[in-house]
Image (cartoon, grey):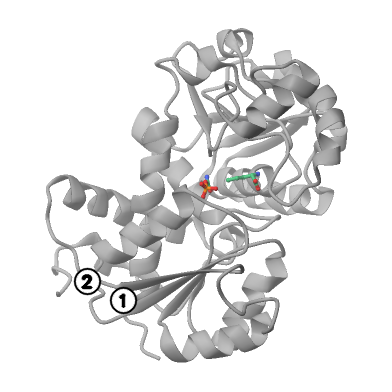
């Protein structure tokens, strides 16, 4: 199926690029990906077919678990008319009997694009190098760029702009979500605040790099351990789970101590702007309806963690719009990077 001439997709050509981290993309390229996402979202709502990548194939490699990212890539690929294969370490040779480099060279012969979720950022770099096809980072310990595109789209849908929005991230600011949100905000001119204990601030080298980026876009970067200061006049309060995939269970006790004051609750929301929204990449521990939630509750006596159930379920919470936007933005990335890519 041909892309209509009037489509925003034709405005730029990112074919052959990989999405390894958002730092590699200019604000204009990110703007383009968001605009393509909006068009594809509209097409989907209108049930307008957009099978622009028929005949192409995508493989999804997951070394960590996922609901949103996997489903978003699968549905996005299928909506674009692609063949999609899911592989995890339990059901393939990857990692145990075959190195990532060998796996990449095999997959690059069969597929037009590769999505990878796992631990090291270097693995995504190596996959792109060895496979010679575009690679999409579906989360590493360091970055989660496809999540950030969905988050930026959600912010823009709520406020009609990105520039000048006061965006506060509360919680573990030195892992994938804190890092990537700081990068995305810096690129697009938002005022980013990491509100966290100083031990969990992002890496100073990344902060310095983002400060340079923000100076060009008109955004700012602030690090504070003061909850009152960090939440004051915020347009967005964002949080993530306190212990990420791949971290040992032994860190729970200290993390609960360190991050309990940074919970997004009624008091934090009341200190933010009156029309502030609550965002979370999900999954979230806002109640005890999960096995981990129950386990933590029985060990530490807390029934809600990074966000109170009240805020999570409030009208200010846009978490499910945000989750839906994963699919539209991931579709834009796949289409933009594969449409004129021929192996
Ligand atoms: N937000 C996110 O990446 O969710 P999953 O872990 O379910 O993919
Ligand atoms: N920081 C979380 C993000 C999940 C989408 C993790 O890495 O587990």
Viewer-nearest residue: 80 or 30? 80
> Could you tell me residue 252's position as x and y percent?
80, 33
**Image quadrant occupied by the N terminus:** bottom left
> Which dot marks residue 339?
1
Number of marks in the rendered image:
2
Name the side, left or right, on which 330 lies relative to 140: left
> Could you tell me residue 103's position as x and y percent?
59, 84
Q: What residue is disc 2 on?
A: 52
Alpha-carbon neighbours of circle 1 within 10 Å: few (<14), some, or many (≥20)? Answer: some
- Of callouts 1 and 2, which one flags the residue occurring earlier in the amino acid sequence? 2
Viewer-nearest residue: 72 or 152? 72
Q: Residue at x 51, y 49 (%)?
A: 147
Name the side, left or right, on which 89 lies relative to 43: right
Viewer-nearest residue: 274 or 335? 335
The image shows residue 279, relative to residue 18, as above or below, that is above
On whether ligand 1 comes within 8 Å of the CB at mark 2, the answer is: no
Alpha-carbon neighbours of circle 2 within 10 Å: few (<14), some, or many (≥20)? Answer: some
Q: Is residue 132 visible?
A: no
Q: Residue at x 14, y 63 (%)?
A: 6
- Circle 1/circle 2 CB separation < 8 Å: yes
Q: CA distance from mark 1 to mark 2?
A: 7 Å
Q: Is residue 257 visible?
A: yes
> Could you tell me residue 142's position as x and y percent?
70, 55
> Could you tell me residue 301's position as x and y percent?
75, 15
Q: Under tag 2, what secondary structure?
A: loop
Name the side, left or right, on which 183 lies relative to 41: right
**Image quadrant occupied by the C terminus:** bottom left
């Amino acid at each position: 199926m041909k892309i209509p001439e009037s489509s925003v997709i034709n405005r730029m050509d990112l074919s052959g690029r990989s999405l390894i981290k958002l730092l590699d993309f200019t604000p204009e390229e990110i703007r383009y990906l968001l605009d393509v996402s909006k068009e594809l979202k509209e097409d989907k709502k209108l049930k307008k077919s957009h099978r622009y990548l028929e005949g192409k194939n995508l493989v999804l490699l997951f070394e960590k678990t996922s609901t949103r990212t996997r489903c978003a890539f699968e549905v996005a690929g299928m909506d674009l008319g692609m063949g999609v294969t899911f592989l995890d370490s339990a059901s393939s040779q990857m990692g145990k009997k075959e190195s990532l480099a060998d796996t990449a060279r095999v997959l690059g012969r069969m597929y037009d694009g590769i999505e990878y979720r796992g631990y090291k950022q270097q693995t995504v770099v190596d996959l792109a190098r060895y496979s010679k096809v575009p690679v999409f980072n579906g989360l590493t310990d360091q970055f989660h760029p496809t999540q950030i595109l969905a988050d930026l789209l959600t912010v823009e849908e709520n406020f009609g702009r990105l520039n000048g929005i006061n965006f506060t991230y509360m919680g573990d600011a030195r892992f994938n979500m804190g890092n990537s949100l700081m990068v995305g905000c810096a690129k697009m001119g938002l005022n980013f605040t990491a509100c966290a204990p100083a031990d969990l601030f992002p890496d100073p080298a990344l902060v310095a790099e983002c400060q340079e980026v923000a100076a060009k876009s008109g955004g700012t970067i602030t690090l504070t351990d003061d909850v009152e200061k960090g939440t004051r006049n915020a347009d967005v309060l964002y949080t993530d789970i306190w212990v990420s995939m791949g971290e040992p269970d032994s860190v729970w006790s200290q993390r609960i101590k360190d991050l309990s004051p940074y919970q997004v609750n009624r008091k934090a929301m009341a200190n933010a702007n009156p029309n502030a929204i609550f965002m979370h990449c999900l999954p979230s521990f806002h109640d005890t309806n999960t096995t981990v939630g129950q386990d933590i509750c029985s060990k530490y006596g807390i029934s809600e963690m990074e966000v109170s159930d009240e805020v999570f379920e409030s009208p200010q919470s846009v978490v499910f719009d945000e989750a839906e936007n994963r699919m539209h933005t991931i579709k834009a990335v796949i289409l933009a990077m594969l449409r004129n890519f021929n192996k």
